[in-house]
Image (cartoon, helix red, strand yellow):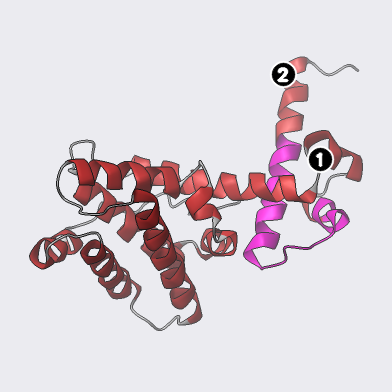
Amino acid sequence: MTQTPNRLERRKAQTRGALISAAQGFIASGELNVPIAEITKAADVGMGSFYNHFESRDQLFQAAVDGALELLGMYLDSLTDVDADPADAFTRSFRISGRLFRLQPELSRVLIHSGPELITSQHGLGPRAVRDIGAGVDAGYFRVPDIQLSLALVAGALLGLGQLLLEQPDRDDAQAVDAMAYSVLLALGVPDDDAQDLCARPLPPMSDVPSVDGERE
């Protein structure tokens, strides 16, 4: 029986999603040179199906990283107060992102292994951080001469923090995240008292935490 276009599109989307999910699992475990055959086996799809969606493993891995970054970015957007000032919005996003390293370690490992993608990707944290830093500069909260360099500083701090939290499970994550957020704010030119205040503000409830398998925790 010939499949209807809608059903065919759903199956194609399911296959693509399965490949991306499998790739995210390999990225999370640091297996970046895994053969395509192993990826298709993990996704439970045929080799031919792979090339219906991606030209290469690198293209698939790029889609997997972009998907994880955008998943996190959308989650942060869902917790954003539209009336918050730029400094508060930036600090909140950093503190929530840091807490996700323990709440969703699989997603976090994808981010850690993506490394520079946090800075260069047009998805997820990078564009949102640039937006908030730029708005903070315009509003006089941040004093930085180069927003891209500031983004590199923020991304490096977040990745280093995430690696530390994953390697040291006994470390108090909330305390560590807020301490790093405080240091980042100082580096962006925020006065000490203001930085302390921003890092002490209550965060919204972190429900429906995203995961790279598409489910919610």
Badge 1 is on which residue?
Answer: 55
The answer to whether any part of residue 216 appears in the image is no
| Residue 120 is inside the magenta segment | no
Identify which amino acid the numbered label 2 is placed on: Asn
Q: Residue sitting at 91 percent across and 18 percent down? A: 1
Label 1 secondary element: loop
Magenta stretch: dominant secondary structure: helix
Identify which amino acid the numbered label 1 is placed on: Glu
| Residue 18 is inside the magenta segment | yes
Name the side, left or right, on which 137 lies relative to 156: left
Disc 1 or disc 2, which is closer to the eye?
Answer: 1
Q: Nearer the viewer, residue 144 or 45?
A: 144
Q: Which portion, as a residue range, is magenta?
A: 14-41
Q: Residue sitting at 36 percent across and 45 percent down? A: 130
Identify the image quadrant of residue 170: bottom left
Above or below: residue 111 compared with residue 78: below
Query: How many other residues sit within 10 Å of disc 2, few (<14), some (14-19) or many (≥20)?
Result: few
Identify the image quadrant of residue 168: bottom left
Q: Residue furthest front?
A: 145
Above or below: residue 100 compared with residue 59: below
Residue 174, percent from left and from top:
30, 70
Q: Residue sitting at 66 percent across and 68 percent down? A: 29
Q: CA distance from mark 1 to mark 2?
A: 24 Å
How many labels were placed on the picture? 2
Name the side, left or right, on which 131 lies relative to 201: right
Q: Mark 1 near mark 2, Cβ–Cβ under 8 Å?
A: no
Q: Residue sitting at 22 percent across and 46 percent down? A: 137
Sequence-first disc among 1 and 2: 2
Badge 2 is on which residue?
Answer: 6
Query: How many other residues sit within 10 Å of disc 1, few (<14), some (14-19) or many (≥20)?
Result: few
Label 2 secondary element: helix
Name the side, left or right, on which 6 lies relative to 45: left
